[in-house]
Image (cartoon, helix red, strand yellow):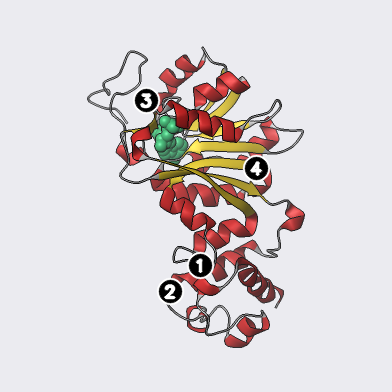
Amino acid sequence: MSRAYPPRTDAAGFATEAKKHLGQNFLHEKGVIAKIVQAIDPKPGDVVVEIGPGQGALTFPLLQRHGALTAIEFDRDLHAPLQAAARAHGTLRLVEGDVLGVDFSALAAELAPADGRIRLVGNLPYNLSSPILFHALDHAGAIRDMHFMLQKEVVERMAAGPGSKVYGRLSVMLQAYCAVTPLFTVPPGAFRPAPKVDSAVVRLVPKPADRIEVADRVMFAHVVRAAFGQRRKTLRNALQGVADASAIEAAGLRADARAEQVEVAGFIRLANLLASR
Ligand code: SAM
């Protein structure tokens, strides 16, 4: 698509105005950047893949520390200045496009043939955080760990347990496949432009295949989605057409419980039972 006016740029060629529709809130606070790099702590041989490098706030310090990095960026106005500025720091391989179209399993097979797993990092575009998390889950076997900056409220939902008001589909889906560890919060002032909300950095470590208890991923996702679709309803009502009261009880759950009271293991038992029938 051609544009009448190219964006105004700074001396390095980066647009001076962030694109809101791409969730562009660029990190500038050096202390926060150092803390994230420290949390990632890349070791020789690690294959690090960054989602949304933007203007390089995390990319360049990671390159300085690790030497090489692959980054996936959608905004084509960023590609040339990012490549140019990266040269002073290390070897950047840039994947130009939408992260949701990137096959992490194929990328891991290509970049990390020995281990078959990559390390994902990124200050994510907040408007896409759930789709990116679910996309990563689909490739969890190809990912060693993930370090993401997200809205604090999203990180709270990811890590919540039963009984919490924010325990929901995201909590159950992520915790079935990953260990979720919130690391630290980041105030709006660390970004330019400043978002309206607090942010937080979270670490996700996918469980090894032999520790994942979900027998049928599609059935599990279906049950969890239905159960939380109407979270005020009892399981018996919310799961109509998916599981009847006898199946719910056979899985060791109370049919009059609500989804927000059910542990991750309970959803797994129910989905496994339904899948086995
Ligand atoms: N890492 C930079 C930083 O910390 O300053 C930028 C973070 S900014 C919150 C999110 C970045 O993701 C932006 O550079 C944006 O252009 C990019 N982005 C947005 N949607 C994307 C998508 N679908 N695929 C890849 N990158 C995307």
Disc 4 designates what residue?
A: 143
Disc 2 designates what residue?
A: 230
Q: Residues within 10 Å of mark 3 (few under 14, many from 20)?
A: some
In the rendered structure, find residue 105 and report the number of the disc placed on it: none
Coordinates of residue 119 in the picture (x, y in percent)? 62, 37
| Gap in angstroms between the C-alphas marked 2 and 1 | 9 Å
In the rendered structure, find residue 225 and report the number of the disc placed on it: 1
The mark that comes first in sequence, 1 or 3, is: 3
The mark that comes first in sequence, 4 or 1, is: 4
Mark in the foreground, 3 or 2 = 2
Element type where label 4 sits in the image: strand
Element type where label 3 sits in the image: helix
Specify whether residue 165 is in view.
Answer: yes
Q: Is 180 situated left or right of 83 in this image?
A: right
Q: Is 11 situated left or right of 140 in this image?
A: left
The mark that comes first in sequence, 4 or 2, is: 4
Residue type at numbered disc 2: Gln
- Location of the C terminus (image quadrant): bottom right
Disc 3 designates what residue?
A: 77
Q: Picture quarter containing residue 232?
A: bottom left
Specify whether residue 96 is in view.
Answer: no
Mark in the foreground, 4 or 3 = 4
The mark tally for this picture is 4
Element type where label 1 sits in the image: helix
| Gap in angstroms between the C-alphas marked 1 and 3 | 37 Å
Mark in the foreground, 1 or 3 = 1
Residue at 57 percent of width and 56 percent of height: 174
The mark that comes first in sequence, 2 or 1, is: 1
Q: Is 193 situated left or right of 210 in this image?
A: left
| Gap in angstroms between the C-alphas marked 4 and 3 | 29 Å
Q: Is 18 situated left or right of 31 in this image?
A: left
